[in-house]
Structure formats: structure tokens, C-alpha cells
Amino acid sequence: GLGALVAGTIGPLALAAGAVAVAVVAVAAVPDRPWQGPLAVAVALAVVVALLRHVVRRLGGITGDVLGAIVEITTTLVYLGLLLSG
């Protein structure tokens, strides 16, 4: 099926550790508001998880194009989250 080569290659522990690591590094992204970087990461993660669930439901899996789109959407959402002023 779609995504069979990458399915299950990254476990939930590694995914969680990676997300936490990115959120920790994001603290320094907006020095005046240390909460803004991690919040931008968390919001982007929530959006892409919902999008991935939708794509899996509609397509029955994921493709390389879906993975590429997810990377681009995540990056854009984090950048937008960092640009918003509090």
C-alpha cells in the first residue's frame, strides 16, 4: 500500500523526542517571548497531525509527495507562528 516503505520506521518515542527537541531549541527563536517558539511548534504539529490523519483516511496511506507537503506546511506554520507579535 501507499507508504509501505516508510510505515513504522520511526516509533512514537523517537517522534516525541524529536518534537520536544525542536520545541526546546525554539525557545531561543524569539528571545523576548520564550514561549512563542515552542507554541508555534506545537500548533504546527497539531495541524499536520490532523492533516496526516485526513490524508491517510482519503488516500489509504501516505506518499513521498504527502511527506514533502507536510514538511513545507510545517515549516511555513512555524515561521508564521514566530512572526506573530504578542
Image (spheres, rainbow, N blue to C red):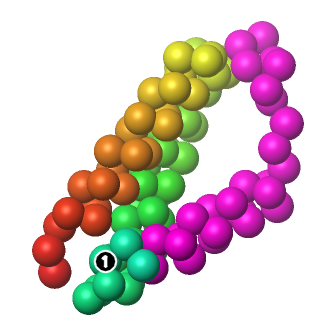
Does the rendering let one see residue 54? Answer: no
Does the rendering let one see residue 65? Answer: yes
Q: Quadrant of the N terminus?
A: top right
Q: Which residue appears at 49% of the width and 37% of the height?
A: 71
Q: Is residue 17 left or right of residue 42?
A: right
Of all residues, the one furthest to the top in this rendering is 1
Give the answer, above or below, for where 16 lies relative to 58.
below
Q: Position of residue 70 (x, y in %)?
A: 49, 34
Q: Is residue 15 left or right of residue 85?
A: right
Give the answer, above or below, for where 74 lies relative to 37.
above
Give the answer, above or below, for where 39 lies relative to 51.
below
Q: Is residue 9 magenta?
A: yes
Q: Position of residue 29 (x, y in %)?
A: 37, 72
What residue type is disc 1 on? Val
Q: Which residues are magenta?
A: 1-27
The answer to which image quadrant residue 28 occupies is bottom left
Q: Position of residue 47 (x, y in %)?
A: 42, 49
Q: Which residue appears at 81% of the width and 44% of the height?
A: 10
Q: Is residue 80 magenta?
A: no
Q: Which residue appears at 32% of the width and 45% of the height?
A: 76
Disc 1 element: loop
Q: Position of residue 6 (x, y in %)?
A: 79, 26
